[in-house]
Image (cartoon, helix red, strand yellow):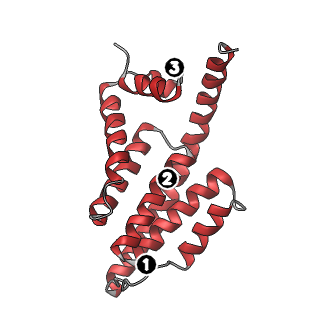
Amino acid sequence: RQAWHLQWIYQSFGFQCRCQACLAREPLSERRRQRITALEEEILTCREKPQKGLGLVEELLDLLRQEGLSAPRTVAQACNDGYELALLVGDLSEVQVWAHMSYEAHRLGWGEEDPMTKQMKYYSQHPPQLAGSRPHLLHEGQEREKRSECESRTPQVLMAEAKAEAKAAESCSATAAGNLEGLD
C-alpha cells in the first residue's frame, strides 16, 4: 500500500517523491500529515471564528515541526494565516507576534530585501488594525507574558525549521531533479 502523502504528492504535482521524509512509512507520521492537510483547509474557514483559527495555526506549526516540514513557503503561509486571523481578533499584541513570525519565515526564505519580508517587518514593528475595529488591549502583565512568549518561541522554532528546511530542500531538489529526468 502506498502511503497517503505519497499518493497526494503524485496527484497534486505529478511525480513520486523519494525523499527520506516521504519514504518513511511511520503510521504516526501518516496521521500527522493527514492532520496537516486537514488543518490547512480548516484554517481557511475560520474567518468567523478567528480565535479558533489561531489555535489551529499553532497546531499546524507544531505538526510541521514534528514532521521536519519547514519550507519557508509553508511556514510563511501558516504565519500569514495567523497574522490575518489575529487582525480579525483585534489583539494588537497577537498581530505583532504573528507579523514577526511571518517576517522571520520570509526573511529566512527570500531574504531581507523581498517586498513581503519588508512588509511583514513593518507590520511587526507597527501592527495594523482593521478599519472600524477597536484594539483589544491586554493588561500589562498579559502583554509582558505574550511578548516573552513571542521572544522565546519564535527564534527557536524558526531556526529549527530553517535547518530542517535546508536538509529537506536538498533532498527534495535532488528527488525532483531525478524525477524530471525521465520526463524528457
Up/down of 129 relative to 54, above or below: below
Q: Is residue 23 above or below residue 79?
A: above
Q: Identify which residue is drawn at 62% across, 62% down.
A: 116
Question: As drawn, is 103 to the left or to the right of 32?
Answer: right
Disc 1 to disc 3, C-alpha distance: 43 Å
Q: Amino acid at mark 1?
A: Leu
**For this view, does 144 lie left or right of residue 55?**
right
Residue named by callout 1: 130
Where in the figure is residue 184, as x and y percent of width and height?
A: 70, 14
Q: CA distance from mark 1 to mark 2?
A: 20 Å
Numbered disc 2: secondary structure? helix
Label of residue 16 in the image: 3
Could you tell me which residue is drawn at 60 percent across and 74 percent down?
122
Crowdedness of circle 2 by 10 Å Cα count: few (<14), some, many (20+)? some
- The picture places residue 136, in percent across and down from the top left corner, at 34, 82
SS at mark 3? loop
Looking at the image, the residue that sits furthest to the front is 132
Does label 1 or label 3 sit earlier along the sequence? 3
Q: Check disc 3 and give the amino acid type.
A: Gln
